[in-house]
Image: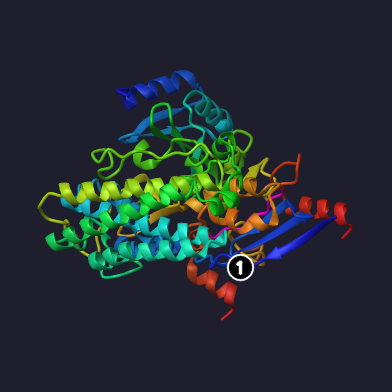
Amino acid sequence: MTIRIPVGPQHPALKEPERFIFYVEGEQIVKVIPRIGFNHRGIEKAMEERTYLQDLYISERVCGICSNVHTACYVLLVERLMNMEIPERAKYIRMIVLELERLHSHLLWLGVAFHEIGFDTLFYLVWRDREIVMDLLELISGNRVNYATNTIGGVRRDISEETKHKILKGMKLLLERLKYYRRLSPEEQTIVKRTLGVGPLSTQDAKRLCAAGPTLRASNVKSDVRGDEPYLLYKEAEFQTMVSDLCDVLGRILVRIDECIEAVRIIEWCVKNMPDGPIRQKLPPIFKVPENQAYRRVEAPRGELVYYGVSDGSEKPYRIKIRTPTLANIPALCKMLENQHIADIPIVVASIDPCFSCTDRLVFIDIEKGKKWSCSMPYFKHLIKKKFGR
Amino acid sequence: MGITPEEICKDLKDKVKEIEKCEKMAPNQLLVTTSSDKICEVIEKISNNYNAYHLSTISAVDLGKEIELNYHLFSYKYMVDITVRCSIPKDNPRIKSIIDVIPGAILYEMEVHDLFGVYFEGNPNMNERLILPEDWPEDLPPPLWKDVKTEELRKRLYKQ
């Protein structure tokens, strides 16, 4: 007998509103319908009605955890629309803040993942270590959330010699901790028993469903925007793409820890090689952008983030299109949950590092065995009626 | 590596006859223009020949009388972004769905359907909402059309 279990929108596992309806047979999931769309704010429309500089602040508020990567992608887009070059030093500062943000986001996720599998000791330890990064971000920008570092034409805050020294000291400490987690994760039985083989996503499915970010790389696809199409100075920093061939939740944990270690290396490289010079090219608050179109991709902590912009010669953009990484990973998430156990739902859902504030979508998906993986609501209602007589 | 965007463009035109125009948009970015009825064939051929299985998103732009659709693909063969562009009339916005070629496109098509009213023939979720609430009035125009003003939407939706 199939039982329907609605979970959310006030979700017990995640701190954001979304709803999942699970159809289960005994302990096994046969169907899942995610309904996501409780937080739509109309940001794309709002951006068309404001000036380029005002939009910078809107883009920062698309997401709470990865706010800096949104402004980074937005300023790269506007700078390409204007054919503008930014000072060298600004590129280094942007990269340092971007990678610090990736560290804090991945460590936050790692803590949540350990919490979901019931390993709260590690959750506390990881979040304690995350404070090293949070303190550094606060030191650089003055904020723990929404750093407001990037601006069109450069960055708003410089990094002093003293801060540089503190960053290097923090990174050294963090690297030791990260190496410990990297060694521990594939060996500790509490982690392995709950994650190995759970939430599987084959390489072929990951490619077919256009997954992004660590979810894609944990399915053994070597794809990272920083390596494929380097922006800022990732080419000069000799960025390495991390992959795992495990194709499950454990793979996603290992890929994220590896990426943290790589992020520490990039931050150290940036701090050591940073040249002197100006940090921004000043622009008036209201400026016109010539008629143009641009497309930019950057690697957010959760995966590929895409901005597409069209300008029409005025001081407001004609169109800004944003695609956040969680949306790209939702079809893959539904595939992962197929034939899994109820007890594994929280960790599998958490394994794509979902961020519904920036995604905010809604979809009906049917993953019944042998059926098409997606269907329309009338057809779906028909299926349910046929199956349960209601 | 070592191949210039112009050379890739020439190669693209040779291999995919349906392409009308191919130009360089930025370093490592190509813009390919085609007609809307050939979209599936073009995307399938580019996807197969250039290892471009990854669709980043579909961006729609309201151009007044037409709606422009941009399919952003990434070619792992040459490490370039290939944007496939086509236009459809705004008074009858219909186009073939590409979910048979790229299954990951399903949500992006639903998003464009919600916000621009474009109907993707072959996508089974076209009667559903993705972003807008279920009680969104049927007679309201798609919200991201240029002639729809936020103030009017607000008046209609909140009746204040």
Is B151 on the left or on the right of A315, as rendered? right
Residue at the left extreme of this rendering: A276
Please, which residue is most extreme toward the top here?
B14
Dot 1 crowding, Cα within 10 Å, few <14, some 14–19, many 20+: few
Check the residue under mark 1 and report the chain it is in.
A
Q: Where is residue A213 in the image (x, y as percent from the top left)?
A: 46, 46
- Which stretch appears magenta? A360-366
Q: Residue at x 60, y 64 (%)?
A: A18
Quadrant of the rendered image containing residue A27:
bottom right
Amino acid marked by disc 1: His
Whether residue B70 can be seen here? no
| Location of residue B110 in the rendering, given as x and y in whole percent from the top left corner | 60, 50
Q: Front-most of A287 and A378?
A: A378
- Relative placement, left or right, of A11 versus B26 is right
Residue B130 visible in image: yes
Please state the horizontal and vertical placement of residue A366, each as a whole percent of the image.
72, 49
Judging by the rendered image, the residue that carries numbered circle 1 is A11
State yes or no: residue A296 in magenta.
Answer: no
The quarter of the rendered structure image containing the C terminus of chain B is bottom right
